[in-house]
Image (cartoon, grey):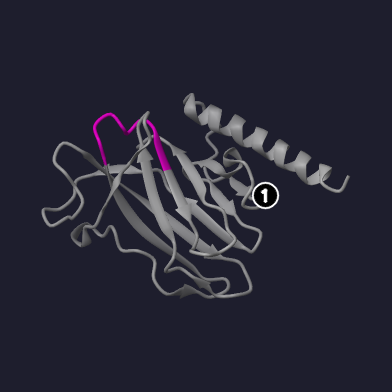
Amino acid sequence: MGTRAPLRAAVAFAAAAAVATAGAACGGSSGKAGATITLSGGPSASPQSRTASFGDTYAYRDGLRVTVTQPVKFTPSGTALGHEAGNQAVKLTVALANGGRNPLDTSGVLVTLESGAKADRAQQIFDSASGVGTPFTGSLEPNGSGKATVAFDVPPGGLGRLDVAVRPGFGQERETAHWTGSAG
């Protein structure tokens, strides 16, 4: 009897996320970038409740907020690592804001990208000359924020379906969140 309200809330949230994702996948958009999605489930929450469109912000219960920008194409420098000829490089920004009471260790933040119909894992690109690939380091104090620009090498035909996953830290009780859409 005590689990029905949280279950109803989780189902309602998953349905709203599915509608938002379906609209984005169909090219529909309200023109309102930057929606905030509050995670209400724990590690057992359905994957649909952790999926948003690029530009949306995930707000975790402990005050952490994560935003991922839409990936954009770019040309890596000649010194870039992780880029193969014939693939398309994309870059995006991950922004963290610590609205919690404790410092946030950012060294465990993991960002990955899968692309295409087969959800192929894209290789991360490290390119200091282009200002991409430097991971989060250190910690964010309460009310602190930080950004990292990361890049990935997407195989041909994969730009139409991108899934960026952000895991906020190792061994922490925060779920991995996903942002989906296409490259800009």
Location of the N terminus (image quadrant): top right
Q: Is residue 184 visible?
A: no
Query: Amino acid type of disc 1?
Result: Gly
Please say if 29 is above or below 13: above
Question: What SS does tag 1 mark?
Answer: loop
Q: Quadrant of residue 130?
A: bottom left
Q: Is residue 83 left or right of residue 101?
A: left
Q: Quadrant of residue 7?
A: top right
Q: Residue at x 78, y 46 (%)?
A: 6
Q: Quadrant of the C terminus?
A: top left
User: Residue at image x 71%, y 42%?
Assistant: 10
Extreme residue toward the left, this view: 78
Instruction: Depth check: give the residue in front, 6 or 134.
Output: 6
| Residue range of the region highlighted in magenta in the rendering | 154-163
Q: Is 127 placed above or below 8 here? A: below
Q: Is residue 162 magenta?
A: yes
Left or right side of 98 for 80: left
Task: Mark 1: give few (<14), some (14-19) or many (20+) Cα within 10 Å.
Answer: some
122 shown above or below 100: above
Of the pair 136 and 27, the residue shown nearer to us = 136
Residue occupying image coordinates x 49% and y 63%: 169
User: Residue 63's spot in the image, x, y percent?
Assistant: 62, 63
The residue indicated by pointer 1 is 41
Position of residue 56 measured from the top left corner of the image (x, y, whole percent): 53, 46
Q: Is residue 180 magenta?
A: no
Q: Main structural element of the magenta stretch: helix, strand or loop?
A: loop
- Within the image, what quadrant is residue 134 found in? bottom left
* Residue 5 rendering spot, x and y as whole percentages: 82, 44
Residue in the image at 62% along x and 69% along y: 100
